[in-house]
Amino acid sequence: MRLPENTFARYMVVGLFNLTVFYLLYESLFVAFKDKNFGESIAWAGAWILGSIFAHWTHRAWTFNTDLGAARTMAAAFAVYTVGLIGSTACFALAVETLEINHRVAWLANCALWGFLDYLGLREIAFRHETKQVEDLS
């Protein structure tokens, strides 16, 4: 399987844009839920869901240059994002609620870890490029 050149570099550039949107969503939801039990974790999960919808379209258009159908990539991306939602929210809650790490420090560390894992999932599952068969002419 051969992906377009510089896929990871494009993912990082587009990801910084998506990360900014995600952070703004998180901070908005944090303000709304800060006085609630598990408010930071609720804000994380809500921002992850909304940010994932946004990120699907930016990665579809600019990172992976796919010609796969939108319904197929959306369904596959949301499978990846659902795993990320569950795993990242568990990690975030552990860091903030149990280990009492500052929620913004946990946010940053969690984004780094799960951003890389999302890249692998998106590359290998959601936006996977099919291998073209080359005939052996010998």
Image (cartoon, helix red, strand yellow):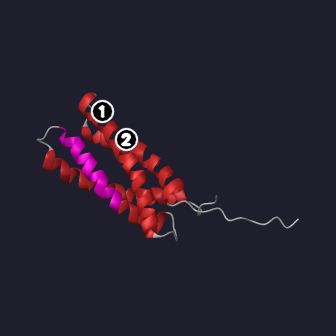
Which image quadrant for residue 56? bottom left
x, y (%) of residue 1? Answer: 64, 58
Res. 127 mark:
none
Find disc 2 in the rendering and name its residue: 87
Find disc 1 in the rendering and name its residue: 94
Spot the residue most to the top: 99
Spot the residue most to the right: 138
Q: Could you tell me if the residues under marks 2 and 1 are in contact, i.e. CB atoms within 8 Å?
A: no
**Residue 108 drawn in magenta:** no
Name the one closer to the observer, 135 or 36. 135
Q: Earlier in the sequence, mark 2 or mark 1?
A: 2
**Residue 52 drawn in magenta:** yes
x, y (%) of residue 64? Answer: 51, 64
Q: Residues within 10 Å of mark 2 (few under 14, many from 20)?
A: some
Q: Nearer the viewer, mark 2 or mark 1?
A: 2
Spot the residue most to the left: 35
x, y (%) of residue 6? Answer: 56, 60
| Highlighted magenta segment, given as a residue range | 38-53
Kindly identify the residue that appears in the image at 19 percent across and 47 percent down: 30
Local secondary structure at mark 1: helix
Name the one closer to the observer, 98 or 16. 98
Q: Please, is residue 72 above or below residue 102 in the view?
A: below
Q: Please, is residue 8 above or below residue 88 in the view?
A: below
Tag 1: amino acid: Leu
x, y (%) of residue 115? Answer: 42, 49
Q: Please, is residue 21 above or below residue 100 in the view?
A: below
Which image quadrant for residue 51? bottom left
Compute the Cα span from label 2 to label 1. Answer: 11 Å
